Image: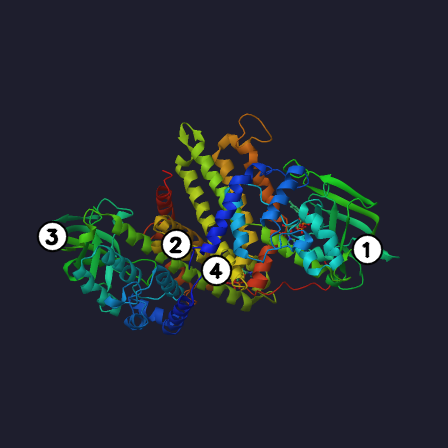
Amino acid sequence: MDFGLTEEQLMLQESIGGYLRSACPLDSVREATEVGSTHVPKIAAGLAELGAVGILIPEELGGVGMGFLEAALISEALGSVIAPVSFVASSVMAPVALLGAGSQEQRETWLPRIASGEVIIGVGISEHISRRETDGIFADDDTLTGKAMFVLDGMDADTLLVADNEAQLYLVQASDVTRNKLKTIDRTRSVAEIILDQTSAEILPGSVNNRKHLKDMVNAGRVMLAADTLGAAGTMLEQAIEYAKERRQFNRVIGSFQAVKHMCSEMAADLEPCRSLVWYAAHAIRAIPDEATLMACHAKAHLAETGRFVARKATEVHGGMGFTDLLGLHYWFKRIGFDRQLLGAPEVVREEAAVAQGWI
Amino acid sequence: MDLAYSPEYEQYRMEVRQFLDTNKDQSPPLYGRGNGDGKARDWQKLLIENGYAARTIPKEYGGFGGEPDILKSHIIAEEFASAAVRPGHSGDNRLVPTVLELGTEEQRQWLVPPTVRGDMIWCQGYSEPGSGSDLASLSTRAVIDGDDFVINGQKIWTSGAQHADMIFCLVRTEPDAPKHQGISYLVFSMDTPGIEVRPLVTMTGEATFNEVFFTDVRVPKHQIIGNRGEGWFVANNTLKHEREGLGDPNQAENRFREIVDLMQRETIDSNRLIDNPTYRDRLLSLQGRMLAMKFNGMRVLTSQIKKEEPGLPRWIIKLQGCELNHQMAAMAIDSMGELGILYDDGPYLRDQGRWQQRYMMDLGLIIGGGTAQIQKNMIGERALGLPKEPKFEKPLN
Ligand SMILES: Cc1cc2nc3c(=O)[nH]c(=O)nc-3n(C[C@H](O)[C@H](O)[C@H](O)COP(=O)(O)OP(=O)(O)OC[C@H]3O[C@@H](n4cnc5c(N)ncnc54)[C@H](O)[C@@H]3O)c2cc1C
Ligand SMILES: Cc1cc2nc3c(=O)[nH]c(=O)nc-3n(C[C@H](O)[C@H](O)[C@H](O)COP(=O)(O)OP(=O)(O)OC[C@H]3O[C@@H](n4cnc5c(N)ncnc54)[C@H](O)[C@@H]3O)c2cc1C
């Protein structure tokens, strides 16, 4: 029994975290996002070099062949510096689909290029979580028609992975679709609307009449978003604590006021157990597949709730400064808000958790 | 991350299970109280002989004499909990470790074996009317007279004092010393002349705690644990052991299963309670919190096995665990609707009225053993490094 990280995992955490802290300070996030970029090539290249981009891709296909816990640690590190790079879709959800349902040829074509950072794959499956009437993709022979909303990593992608109304998975070329950027609260990440009109598409053969692969993608994506929130909320809490130790009012540092101290303790007390939940959920994907869906749902929902609480309280600790653009705390606040809604808001995933354990 | 137990521990788990299968008829009821009656005493004896109670207490003090093994203790706790069988005890999980660590050889021989057998029942005399959270300000006095301490003063909230044989008690022996350095830790019989116990009825309707008055109570000088003036240090040792027991995630998981069972069993308008989406969503939120605490507990356990200081994950257990238990009881009551107000007895009572009982008792535990606010002070100051509040020169009125 060993519920914790291995030496290698700690080293990975340290190397990725260390790299991101120096490569991705708030100033460079601002600089990039102010001109509308959600994918800074320099940071992406650095991450590719460290193996982060190909974390799940087997070594023989150019990746480092690690597991979901390692991927979650990377996602957490990206969230903690609000890195403007693609990850959840391109490095996790797309490889899950390709490894699970792709043909030998598809795997050999795409996975090495993802691992090297040469291509980014966006993922458009949100209609399978909540579909609005006007949306959805329908297959007809070798073409797809319809609309996918909230395509993750969508604007930066070269290639898109989408699901038709029967959860069959396809690759389409970004240049073959109409693609519109959706402006969201979170400027560090890209989501797109894509419109297909008899667009030629290549099906992932394993997904024919098989919903499992979509489900696997969603589970993995949810755990990654939960981990991203863990990282972002962790940074907000750290900043709040630092600020509370320095800011003086009434001749005292504000951290000595119980009202402020208790806000910090409540954040820490709520957030710390979340770390264990994310670890478990990530570990379960491969090691305890029977629990994968349930745990992914709980990680997603519980981190969304705790993340929201921390985002709001950490802002309050900073007083008026917390509300400003100057301090930039709002970047984390918004990243947490983005993670919450994507791939299922808490109420939605909790209901799936009820189904997953046979309650309804 | 390796959640499997090695074959040695799997084997051990099977042994515990087998033991429970064969012997659980002999155990006293799970929710009963006290360990003084015959059945409870025999059960405790059987558990000690098999290494399922008082496992690490040396044989010469009445224990099983096993090597400390956190995983084995954990397996025992898990298996007893999932079989819903009353676990054994280590005498008194606050006092026994303290005496073993800080008592003299004579005191260990005198106090530990009967306590471990369940023949010597203890109460904790710390809190006073004027000293609750600020325990170190306590004012019950003990002065030396010949070979005795002579005690005058009052304790309050003393759980189980009306049934106890003995008390471990904090008294002020050095009134002129700074407040943390003038306290001593005494142990004495509740039959000592001059002790008066007045039961205090709690909100549950039962008198689980008491006021205890001392008038010229004479206690031989050697019945002190540690040195004079070092009682605060000794008491903290006891409190550490007490705190660790509050907010136990195993207990939370078991209670969660009970709620799910209740909500799948009970119906309103022919629908199971769990079919109501509003209640169900609330139940699922609680499950998320419960799971986070369960895995947090596994993380703490892992640190302990590796002999590392668990830090923040441990600091938060009392605060989060007690609150979670309280919220779960609230959920169970709410989902039952009107049935949720039934209490004591009656034909419509569900689960013997346990949820109402717990809803109140768990609030008591949010307060007792260091209030939630004191926990937040400790987390903020000790785990997060936030500054203490400025101290006043003189006490304010
Ligand atoms: C939207 C907005 C509009 C504003 N408009 C104006 C305006 O038009 N004109 C103007 O003059 N000002 C304005 N303000 C400033 C506002 O009044 C201050 O932000 C507010 O008084 C808090 O002061 P502070 O930001 O310095 O935070 P601080 O006082 O530094 O507070 C930081 C944290 O410490 C806590 N804290 C501080 N002291 C104590 C204490 N004694 N006990 C417990 N907790 C404490 C606070 O609650 C907060 O959580 C505005 C602020 C905002 C957010
Ligand atoms: C069920 C139960 C069983 C108990 N059993 C025992 C027992 O066996 N033996 C024993 O000795 N004691 C026992 N106690 C007493 C328990 O330890 C005290 O109730 C507890 O320490 C709080 O002290 P108090 O009741 O005097 O409250 P107070 O200390 O007066 O607190 C009142 C309120 O003020 C708050 N407060 C106090 N100081 C601070 C501060 N510095 N910062 C912020 N807030 C503060 C508290 O959080 C609380 O909300 C028991 C209590 C309960 C409820």
Mark pair 2, 4: CA separation? 26 Å
* Location of mark 3 (residue): A142
Tag in front: 1 or 4: 1
- Quadrant location of the C terminus of chain A in the rendered image: top left
Residue type (three-letter) at the residue carrying disc 2 = Ala
* Location of mark 1 (residue): B142
Q: Residue at x 20, y 55 (%)?
A: A194
Q: Secondary structure at mark 1?
A: strand
Residue B52 placed where, x, y %?
A: 58, 48
Residue type (three-letter) at the residue carrying disc 1 = Ala
Which label belongs to residue A314?
4
Mark pair 3, 1: CA separation? 92 Å
**Other-residue count near label 1 (Cα within 10 Å), few / some / many at <14 / 14–19 / ≥20:** many
**Dot 4: chain letter:** A
Same chain? Circles 2 and 3: yes
Tag in front: 2 or 3: 2
In the image, B261 versus A167, the foreground residue is B261
Residue B338 placed where, x, y %?
A: 51, 30
Which label belongs to residue A281?
2
Question: Is B260 located above or below residue B141 in the figure?
Answer: above
Relative to B51, is A85 on the left or the right?
left
